[in-house]
Amino acid sequence: MTIFEANISISLIDFFKSNLKNIDSLERANFFLKEISGINSFFKNKEELMELKKRIEEDISIIKEPNRRAYGDFQTNEDLANNIVKYLSKRRVSPEFVIEPTCGKGRFILAALKQFKGIKKIVGVEIYYPYVWETKFGILDLFLNEKPTCKPEIEIIHEDVFNFNLEDLAKENKHLNILVIGNPPWVTNSELSTLNSNNLPQKSNFKSHKGIDAITGKGNFDIGEYISLQILRNFDENKGGFAFLVKSAVVKNILHNQWKSKYQIGNIRKLNIDAKKEFNVSVDACLFFTKFNSSAEYTCQEIDFYSQEEITEFGWHKNKFVYSIVDYNKAENLDGKSPFVWRQGMKHDCSKIMELDRFNGHFINGFKQEVSPEQNLLYGLLKSSDLKHEVVDFYRKTTIVTQKKVGQDTSYIKREYPKTYDYLENNRAYFDRRKSSIYRGKPPFSIFGIGDYSFAKYKVAISGMYKRTTFSLVLPEKDKPLMLDDTCYFIGFNTIKEAKIAQTILNSDIVQAFLKAIIFSDAKRSITKDILMRIDMEKAYHLLESEINISEHSDWKLFGEKFKEGSSNQMSLFSN
Ligand SMILES: C[S@@+](CC[C@H](N)C(=O)[O-])C[C@H]1O[C@@H](n2cnc3c(N)ncnc32)[C@H](O)[C@@H]1O
């Protein structure tokens, strides 16, 4: 059932019917409801009171909810809100003042009222009017049916949190033990631009990023992150704590920035939840829990919320931002500069034309058309999903490689490979439609991520998209090297022996521990060129020397010699 588009229980409708029947005065109605529930100004004005009285006598229909995407609307379910509040209670959180800055349907407020005994005040803020009502109805229902152990003064405020004065609220309540709890909107500022929404903090120049850049150091981010930062900034000197459900990246970003912001927060915890189960969304999310008024801390314990199993401690350690302090301590001496230049695979942004499937010796493009270019410019292509095994010598896709290095003139294709040229020229419109500015002013059919290194026969490669940190050895097809797409990274070698040694070093326990220490797997692309360029393979090689009897392994010894050569010529022998 809904009233004012807010869900309401039948028992509450009956309660209103019998108790408000003879009350037409705003003051009397509000006094009566405050006595029961503690809610201040249940009705803002007489019109609201009369409207409610009218609506409870009518047939109440279920109204379809409007699209609330711009409000990042993922309401916390009752069980999760209750479990979070119980968890906090176990950790001796016992607030006198509970603040829910974007309270939605009020599940955290209800859970707090059921769990905490000493609450004196509650403030909930919500932008969506039906939810303001649903929260008030829920509280009234709770007091009528369950008789909570405390009866605080409650304000449920219909307001945009960006216009709400958090600073004064923090200053005026320094004497109270505060809990700021909630689940702020799950939406990024760039999603809001796409939705043409103005649900943004106007004063801080959020949209043009300037204000927010100063706070977070980057352009696109969650507005939940912004709200979290506002809370930390205003309340970090108050007594009490903070417990927000946020995307995992928000905690990582806040901690990364803590180096500069130095908020007075301690006991920082990231408690991972299953967002698919709780909210039916596929994101990494967690409860971010920390204590105000502590000396500023820079690391965070990551824990599984359900099992309470400790996962890692991440954050600032020895002036580096690392994902696993334990692993970093084991492998920190590998944190340096790679003697090899890691390369990203090729990029063409025209897969329907450039990538071909093979069927019984025939080639089919993305439009299911059969094509027959000359073999010379065709190469096997591997994507992230092809790098699942330690050795890869099989490919599903073939790609046309139009250049040997970036910017190379492509007019040779017409002269030397007329069939390939005709095919490309007939589909030129698809190339011309490529949006990225990198293709502007470049020869027709240009590709990127291509150079001498792409033609190294043997490659040691890894996907940037997966959490797996094992490196694959990529073998050529006869004498022709396989190409990788731009979701992969690799180093190239001319001999299989060198490639195998490089792979052994990279897959060794010590390098794997180093990667585990520095990779944040919640990122979209968890493995990047920057990460790979930090692996000092020469140091790893020397650490492994003790495990291998070098005198018996001439190839290993030779490989070590190459580091010496490499220091003067930037490992050109290896990186090609
Ligand atoms: C992720 S939901 C969570 C709701 C509630 N905190 C909970 O835990 O169930 C985010 C809530 O923020 C509200 N919201 C979005 N933008 C807001 C704003 N600018 N000011 C106040 N509330 C806002 C939405 O309407 C929605 O109810």
Image: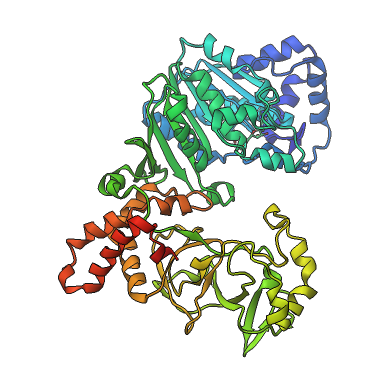
Q: Is residue 200 above or below residue 575?
A: above
Between residue 265 and residue 567, name the one nearer to us. 567
Residue 468: x and y in percent read 42, 60
* Quadrant the N terminus occupies: top right
465 with respect to 446 (left or right)? left
* Quadrant the C terminus occupies: bottom left
Residue 456: x and y in percent read 46, 71
Q: Is residue 148 visible?
A: no
Looking at this rendering, what residue extends furthest in the bottom direction?
360
Which image quadrant is residue 124 in?
A: top right
Residue 161: x and y in percent read 65, 24
Between residue 551 and residue 154, name the one nearer to us. 551
Between residue 554 and residue 104, name the one nearer to us. 554
Q: Ligand 1 is found in which quarter of the picture? A: top right
User: Could you tell me how many numbered marks the image carries?
Assistant: 0
The structure residue drawn at horizontal position 18% and vertical position 68%, both measured from the top left corner, is 550
The structure residue drawn at horizontal position 33% and vertical position 55%, both measured from the top left corner, is 567
Looking at this rendering, what residue extends furthest in the front direction?
568
Between residue 378 and residue 306, name the one nearer to us. 378
- Colour setting: rainbow
573 with respect to 545 (left or right)? right
Residue 315: x and y in percent read 39, 37
Q: Is residue 87 visible?
A: yes
498 with respect to 192 (left or right)? left
